[in-house]
Image: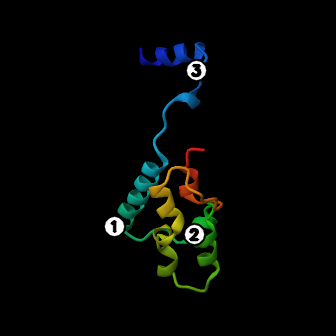
Amino acid sequence: MADDSIFERIADGESAATERRAPSRLKSRVYTELVREQQESGPLLDVSSTKEAGHALCVFEELVQITPAGQPAKSRFYCHVCHARLLGENLEDAPIWWPHCPYVRFQNR
């Protein structure tokens, strides 16, 4: 059984932390492409609705959420123009620390 090897490694003192993880750059690029695919099927949920649903917004989405802009402006993929996306897609352990930023969560820290 494939599961037996996991138990053998745990018994030998290996932890799950020693297993290889996907590079943060790859995770960032996949996330960006998934959101772009979603945009092709229709508009994204606006930032106000996202926040009301209990999801945290990044600093820039919070600013968009409080601005008196129309619904189409609040349904854009703002990560597309954010420096955190560029850093996340091109650097491992990128120097980004924005709260609630998906690209920060992908960093292998």
Residue 47 position within the rendered picture, expressed as x and y whole percent measured from the top left: 56, 71
Q: Pointer 3: what residue?
A: 14
**Circle 1: residue type:** Glu
Q: Name the residue under label 1.
A: 40
Q: Residue at x 45, y 49 (%)?
A: 27
Residue 70: give x, y in percent of width and height: 52, 84
Residue 74: x and y in percent read 52, 77
Q: In which quarter of the image is the C terminus?
A: top right
**Crowd band around label 1 with a 10 angstrom C-alpha radius: few (<14), some (14–19), many (20+):** few
Disc 2 vs disc 1: Cβ atoms closer than 8 Å?
no
Q: In this view, does 10 lie above or below 74?
A: above
Residue identifier under label 2: 49
Distance from label 2 to label 1 (Cα)?
Answer: 20 Å
Count the marks: how many?
A: 3
Mark 3 vs mark 2, foreground winner is 3
Instruction: Say which residue appears at 61% left-offset and 76% top-offset.
Output: 65
Image location of residue 8, percent across then percent down: 53, 13
Badge 3 local density, few (<14 within 10 Å), some, or many (20+)? few
User: Disc 1 on helix, strand or loop?
Assistant: helix
Question: Depth-wise, is mark 2 or mark 1 nearer the camera?
Answer: 1
